Amino acid sequence: MTANDTIRDQFVTGLKDAHALEHQALALMDRQLDHLAHYAEVENRMREHRGETERQIDRLEQILKSLDESHSSFKDATMALGGNLAAMGHMFAADEIIKNSFANFAFENYEAASYKALIQMAKEGGFQSAVPLLEDTLREELAMAAFLDEMLPMVVTKYLNLKAADETASH
């Protein structure tokens, strides 16, 4: 196996993993969206990011197709199930919104790191047509991570105020 074959194999594996990761993101968001009644700012941005995520999946499929490859349905289903289970784990927490805020911030940064790695693999492997598509997705992931970072103080304050007023604060 040549160095180019190794890079291509790793790049394709990374693309399939990212595709599955985006399906996990959809599952996480879908579980959380109905639990944001008191946090409209987060809900609105999450709905927007859900649309971005669907477009990110399309971009990944476009890149895979250009390489005569396809996503892994098994990985997609497994990761979506994992996303559902993770979101359900927080649903019963008294501070669900706070736990979800932490998890979402970590998840967005994980996605950003994976896209940074994919961009480097694309450059190293000569898959230049993939770079702008991956960079678009990276910008979206970084923007969502920045939003979550900026919103955390507001979420915590709103949670504490609702809790002090003996109102539903968890979501």
Image: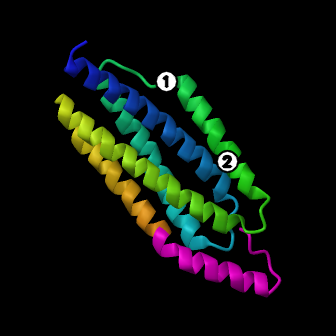
112 relative to 72 in the view: left or right: left
SS at circle 2: helix
In the rendering, at what x and y percent does residue 168 appear? 79, 75
Position of the C terminus, as image quadrant, is bottom right
Compare marks 1 and 2 and give the one earlier in the sequence: 1
Q: Nearer the viewer, residue 151 or 26?
A: 151
Q: Disc 2 marks which amino acid?
A: Ala
Going 24% across and 40% down the picture, which residue do you hit? 120
Residues drawn in magenta: 149-171
Can you identify the residue that label 2 sits on? 86
Can the viewer see residue 6? yes
> Dot 1: within a 10 Å radius of its alpha carbon, few (fewer than 14), some, or many (20 or more) residues?
some
In the rendering, at what x and y percent does residue 74 appear? 57, 24
Q: Is residue 157 magenta?
A: yes
Q: Quadrant of residue 102?
A: bottom right
Can you identify the residue that label 1 sits on? 72
Q: Is residue 138 magenta?
A: no
> Dot 2: within a 10 Å radius of its alpha carbon, few (fewer than 14), some, or many (20 or more) residues?
some
Can the viewer see residue 127? no
Q: Quadrant of residue 152?
A: bottom right
In the rendering, at what x and y percent does residue 55 appear? 41, 44
Q: Quadrant of residue 131?
A: top left
Which of the two discs, 1 and 2, sits closer to the camera?
2
84 relative to 118 in the view: left or right: right
- The span from disc 1 to disc 2 (Cα, nearest Å) is 21 Å
In this figure, which colouring scheme has been used for the structure?
rainbow
Q: Is residue 86 above or below residue 44?
A: above
Q: Is residue 118 above or below residue 102?
A: above
Going 70% across and 62% down the picture, which residue do you hit? 35
Give the main secondary structure of the magenta stretch.
helix
Q: Residue furthest top?
A: 1
Q: Nearer the viewer, residue 117 or 81?
A: 117
